Image (cartoon, rainbow, N blue to C red):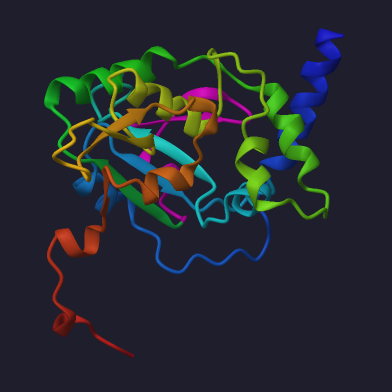
Amino acid sequence: MGWITRTAGSLLANYLTKPLKNTTHIAPISQETLRATLQPADVLLVEGDTRLSIPIKYLTQSTWSHAAIYIGENALPARESWQMPLALVEADLKYGVHAVTLAHYAHLNTRICRPAGLSAEDRKRVVDYVVKNIGHHYDLKHIFDLARYLLPFPVPTRLRRRMLALGSNDPSRAICSTLIAQAFNSISYPILPEIKREWIGDPDCANCYNEIYHIRHYSLYTPRDFDISPFFDVIKPTIINGFDYRSIRWK
């Protein structure tokens, strides 16, 4: 039965990863601009253009259907001099956890999310974590879960996030956002933790509370969470690299 599951998963992956026709992207960031802006451990959110993007956008109510993490241009062994360096790591439906070039997503709408206050040491630990996972497989059970959501049935909001966490729960079988969540969990960096307020018990201070952070399971994270996280900066290259609206030549 194992080979049947693998074959069916491969066929389904090929179907789900085919780009949709007539997809419009308003303001993609060029690979040159990405290269000048990205820092190691930055998360690159992607507005995908495949069949797989549809259920993810629907379930998360978000523009972003995919996430990759920037590891820098020197984290992996150098390739041929004429080849672009592999600078992003992602968990892909067809190829599992693998590295790609910046050009891979330069034609799509993207957003850079940067972990705030991350030390150089922890930045390296995050990069090392995802690099170590290159070669791991995508969660095949998650493929079949996602396939069911291509059917035109409404899904209650309260169930959407749980539906994206129905995979095999095997840490060696990643999906895009869970791989990145695991990397940041490995250094105890918050993404969207559950925050509970507990009264400190001081009778002289009725409004004095401690905020207790609880790490959510990595399988519950989606690309959208890095966008709305209060601990990640949204980096817009056209602004941080210097923007003068008076220099625009309008037609």
Establish if 239 lies above or below 4. below
Q: Position of residue 250 (x, y in %)?
A: 29, 88
The residue lying at 56 percent from left, 31 percent from top is: 92
Q: Residue at x 22, y 31 (%)?
A: 200
- Location of residue 197 in the rendering, given as x and y in whole percent from the top left corner: 32, 37
Is residue 182 in the magenta section?
no
Residue drawn at point x = 64 percent, y = 22 percent: 139
Measuring from the top left, give residue 218's x and y in whole percent: 48, 26
Part of the protein shown in magenta:
85-108
Judge from the rendering whether residue 161 lies leftward or rightward of residue 245; answer left or right: right
Q: Looking at the image, can residue 247 be seen?
A: yes
In the rendered image, the residue lying farthest to the bottom is 251
In terms of image quadrants, where is residue 71? top left
Check the picture and name the quadrant holding the N terminus. top right
Q: Quadrant of the C terminus?
A: bottom left
Picture layout, residue 111 above or below residue 87: below
Q: Is residue 4 left or right of residue 6?
A: right
Q: Is residue 86 visible?
A: no
Q: Indicate whether 201 appears above or below 170.
A: below
